[in-house]
Structures are given as structure tokens and as C-alpha cells.
Image: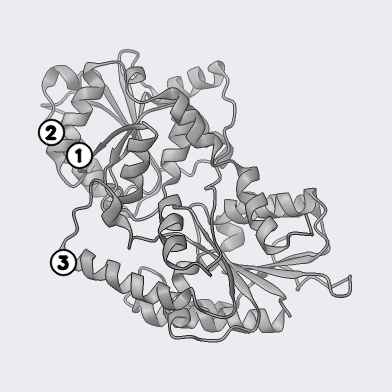
Amino acid sequence: MKYSSPAPRSIQNSPRLMLFDLALGGHHGNYIQHLIDRAYQQGFGGAIDIVVLPQFAEVHQDTVAVIDTYKHPAIALVAISAAEAKALGSRDSGMSRALRNLREWQIFCKYAKNLQTTHALIMYLDTCELPLAIGMHSPCPFSGIYFRPSFHYDMFESYRPDRQEWRQHWRERIAWERIFRHPQLQTVFCLDPFAVTAIASRHHNTKIVHLADPVQPYPVLPSDLATLKTKLGIEVHRQVFLLFGALDRRKGIYQLLDALELLPLKLCQHLCLLLVGKTNPIDRANIHQKITALGPTHPIQSIEQYDFIPEADVPSYFQLADAILAPYQHHVGMSGILLLAAAAGKPVLSSDYGLMGELVRRYQLGLAVDSTKPTAIAQALTTFLSASPQTIGNPSQMKLFAAQNSIDLYASTIFQHLVPDSC
């Protein structure tokens, strides 16, 4: 199965859900995959139409393979047209975010109407902020996952807003106050438990529910770790610091590399920097150039791996590492890296900003620092390298944090609120 015609409605008056997600990469495939797993393992009696971009089947082959295994006549993976995708534009293009969001809402309405959807789950509700705030109508009732609330960050210890951020938080608060009153909005799912509390205290009639950010802890055999370590060529006396995912400015790669320049020779001899993830050619060249320039004066072992890593292989990299690097730059919302680290029982060196910083502090997941400052990152690296990483963080709290974000809890929460009598 790649793409198919809309699923037939075989049962009169049965629910017909639409999962709508016009984003690629990261968690987007997994979130859909976990819902399909849960629905049909538990005997969901309706149809599910999954509306995605034309490139979805290529980018998320693992998700398509899982959907294929069910061979269920009531599951349809429906791609929007190439012309619609082109008109939508890239999220990184020069098109204004407002214009893209309005076009995305038009596509949502078109497919919800054509598919005769009885309820839609918008997998990235943040992209609908403008159309919903101005009261645009939907062909059906809908719910959505709210990923990036930031209006409540003033309740966190590390709140240091500049004027632009302060304006953004107030603009967001005003917009979502209007959205929560939208008559067709049924349930808002949110990954940030602190935002859920803040919203519920202000909007008593809003159905907002905390949603687990699903993480799958795969068992990793010691022999597999030894094989991977040999394959990567990691020197035996090194502590491995893993930076995983998109290797770009947003992840703090350049602040990290600047921090390495500040480390003394003695500590550099014990550090292995493992970079695993995709990046664009410009960033790749810049990263490699900076790492090469470190070599003569800073004897750090650096390993750059820009290959695609299948989901089932990802936990091996986290188990292999002594510490996980997450020096994000003003990241808003949840981070799957924190969850993967917690599932592996490995401490993180994280940004102290927003939700990430608050979770690291509350669950004792590692060290949270001002990651915009290379000096702060260097001090944290020194702490890790001067002590055993196992002494940093709280293993029992890491385990609890991972358990609170299980796949089963994620999927069951959504279906209990969307179709409570179906699963």
C-alpha cells in the first residue's frame, strides 16, 4: 500500500475519522502509526482516512509498512494532489506562515468534506492558529494536538524573554483564547502538562487533555552495542556524547562546537563527539570544517554519521552513549530526545529554556544550562567529563518520565476522547 482511494463506509452511521497531517519527518509518521496500531488491535469499528503530503510514503516507509500489514479495507492513506502540495509551499520557504496556514486550512476543509469525515484529528493543530482564531468554519467537528504553547513560560524558573518573545507570548494567548471558543472544536490534546493546567484554569469549558509523547524502549543486546561501537570506531577510553537528529542551528550544534574550543586538553582526551542525523550540505560542510579546525589543539574524537537511521536502530545509539546532548536554541514544546534518553537511562545536557528545561529539572534528567552561551555548555561538559555520567541525573525519575509517555497511553488517550465507545 502506498496511497489508496478513500475507505468505504461499510457500517451505517459508523465513525469516519480523518487524521490530517501535512508535515514530514520527525515524529509525524510514528504518531500516525501508533494510532492505527491501537485502533485495529482493539477492534475499532469505523474507517480512518489518513490525509498526508505526496512525499509521505517515501519519507515514512516504516509507517506505510505497518499500515500495509493490516490490509484493512477501512484504512486509507490519501495524498493531497501534487498541485495542492506545490501551492502550499515549504514551511522553510519565503511564504508567510499566515498564508501557508490559510492554504492548509482550505485543504483540510476540502478533504474533510469530500471524505464525508465525521470527526477529524488535526495532528499539528498549531498550523491552524490563524484560521481558527478568526473563526473559519470546518465541514465537521474536529480535535487537534497542540504542540508548541509558550504563553505560560513565565511560570518557569529560566524565563528570560526578550521583547520579541514577550510580544509573541501575548499574541499567542489572545489567539488561543479565541480558538478555545470555536464551536466545532471538541478536544485539544497537549504534550505540555503545565500548559494544560494553565489553560484549564482560565478556560473552564475547554476540553484540554494532557497527551503522552510516545516513546518505544527497544531492548538492546550487549553484543549489538559492542558491534556498533566497533563499527563506529569509538576509542575505548572515551566518554561518548551523542547529538542525535537534525544537525542544524536550531539544535545548538554551533554553540556546542564553540564550547568544545573552551575545554582543556586533559578533558578533550576523554571525549568522543558522536553526531548522528541529517543536515543540509551547507551546515554539513560548516560542521566538518569546525571539527577539523579543533583537531590540532583539542584531541577530541569526533564521528559524523549523516546516514538515515531506521527507527528500530535508534535506541542502540542512545544506549551506546554516556550522555545525550540537547543544547536546543529557544526550543518551544516537547523534545523526543529527552524521552529517548530517559528510556535508555542516560543523562542529558539540555537547554534550560521553556518546557525542556523544566522537565530536566523536575525529573532530574541531567543538567540544564543556558545553551545560547558556549561557556555554559563547556562548564556542563566539564562536569560530565570530571565525574562518572552515571552520577548525574536520577535513574528512577528517568524511568518514571519514560513510563508516563508510553505508546499505549498516547493512543488510548486520543481514542478515549474521540470515540469513547469504539475501543
Cβ–Cβ under 8 Å for marks 1 and 2: yes
In the image, is residue 202 above or below residue 129? above
Q: Look at label 2 and name its amino acid.
A: Glu
Horizontal and vertical percent position of residue 151: 32, 63
**Which residue: 59% across, 79% down?**
184
Q: Position of residue 264 (x, y in %)?
A: 11, 23
Give the crowd class for mark 1: few <14, some 14-19, many >=20 residues within 10 Å.
Answer: some
The number of callouts visible is 3
Q: In 3D space, how far apart are the residues under numbered discs 1 and 2 (Cα atoms)?
A: 7 Å
The colour scheme of the drawn protein is one colour
Instruction: State which quarter of the image contains the C terminus.
Output: bottom right
**Gap between marks 3 and 1, in whole Å?**
28 Å
Identify the residue position indicated by label 3 in the image.
163
Q: 246 or 404, which lies in front?
A: 404
Q: Judge left or right: residue 292 versus residue 247.
A: left
Q: Residue furthest right?
A: 11
Closer to the observer: label 3 or label 1? 3
User: Of label 3 and label 1, which has the lower sequence position?
Assistant: 3
Q: What amino acid type is highlighted by mark number 3?
A: Arg
The image position of residue 391, as x and y in percent, is: 33, 18
Q: Is residue 414 left or right of residue 297?
A: right
Task: Please tell me which residue lies in front, 259 or 286.
Answer: 259
The residue pinned by badge 1 equals 257
Vertically, is 423 above or below 299?
A: below
Q: Label 1 sits on what residue type?
A: Leu
Alpha carbon of mark 3 to alpha carbon of mark 2: how far?
Answer: 31 Å
